[in-house]
Image (cartoon, grey):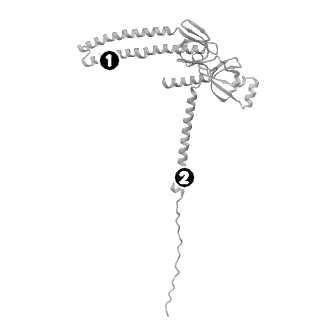
Amino acid sequence: MSDTTTSAAPTTLPTVRRRAGSDLSARGEPYVWMMGAALVIGLGMIMSLLAYVFYVGTTTFWPQRVATVTTLDGRMVAGEVFRSENYKVPSGVLESLPAEAREKIAANLGVANRTLYRVGNYDLFGEDFVWVADFEKKSVTFDRAMFFVERLEWGAFIGKVKSIDLAGKVIERPALDTLNAAIRAGAKRRRAVEVIEKGDINDVNHALDELRLEARRAEIDYGTNSPEAIAERGRVQKQSDILRSQYAVLEKKVSDLRSADERFTISLEAIDGRTKTLSLSRIVRLYPANALRADQKWSVYFDRWVEFLTS
């Protein structure tokens, strides 16, 4: 009997193939694109904001027209159009309106448009801005005699120029060239006072303060009743008397300049008929808001920019 050996067939293993690349999520490429897109969006938002700020900034100094609004109840409002908006009319206001206006507002689901006017004249009206709804308006005109006046105090004045008084010479309804010449002369008088007040008088005050500190320093260093302190106080007193004499001279000069300046005045009339008289030196600029040529508008625009950048 012989042994028979049976050999098993060799087992074939499955072939594993490797991919040349890897999954995109493993390499992070989607997140790179997402971050890049977010960066682009963020930069776009920043540039849009800067462009909007630039647009608003460059148009702020452009002279606007002045509208004269007459309401149904006879009230008159004069001012620059600042903005408009839709708003829900309160029921109390709605009930007091004519039937035609109520029907129109009801057809618009109780919503009406209103305009915000910059009326200025805060010293007379107590407010710079006034809302006027469309249903309140009877008429809107643009009077060529309306002036926009920029003042050093109380902000803008919107109204008409009645007259100017040039040291006793009264000119009714003066021409624009005459007004501008008078305002330039007033600005020179104002600067003359400012040079003395902010220059010479300020220097005298500073010198007086320095002398006072020197006397006090001697008292601290040598003692209040020491010979050195007494001598220093004597010297300080003599120099202070000289400076006070100079101060009195400068103060009188300023008083004389202001007295002379008060003789040059302008009389302005608001939309409600009230008048305001002030020194021409307190006017920065004025212009007929509804009668400006294109070159005059550009002149006002650049003049405001120069004032903003230098003052």
Q: Residues within 10 Å of mark 1 (few under 14, many from 20)?
A: few
Q: For the residue marked with disc 2, what is the amino acid?
A: Pro
* x then y, percent, for residue 309: 50, 26
In the picture as drawn, the residue positioned furthest to the left comes out as 227
Q: How crowded is mark 2: few (under 14 residues within 10 Å), some or many (20 or more)?
A: few
The residue mark sitting in front, 1 or 2, is 2
* x then y, percent, for residue 46: 54, 38
Q: Can residue 226 be seen in this snapshot?
A: no
In the picture as drawn, the residue positioned furthest to the bottom comes out as 1
* x then y, percent, for residue 207: 35, 16
Examine the rendered structure and indicate whether residue 99 appears above or below residue 3: above
* x then y, percent, for residue 190: 49, 14
* Residue 183, numbered label: none
Of 72 and 22, nearer the camera is 22
C-alpha separation, residue under disc 1 versus residue under disc 2: 72 Å
> Residue 253 occupies which quadrant of the picture?
top left
Examine the rendered structure and indicate whether residue 179 appears above or below residue 294: above
* Residue 213, numbered label: 1
Mark closer to the chain start, 1 or 2:
2
Q: Can residue 199 be seen in this snapshot?
A: yes
Position of 73 compared to 221: left or right?
right
Residue drawn at the location 27% of the way across and 17% of the way down: 218
Q: For the residue marked with disc 1, what is the amino acid?
A: Leu
Q: Is mark 1 on a helix, strand or loop?
A: helix
Position of 93 compared to 176: left or right?
right
* Discs 1, 2 touching: Cβ within 8 Å: no
Residue drawn at the location 25% of the way across and 19% of the way down: 221
Examine the rendered structure and indicate whether residue 70 appears above or below residue 55: above
Residue drawn at the location 54% of the way across and 35% of the way down: 50
Q: Name the residue under label 2.
A: 30
Residue drawn at the location 54% of the way across and 52% of the way down: 30
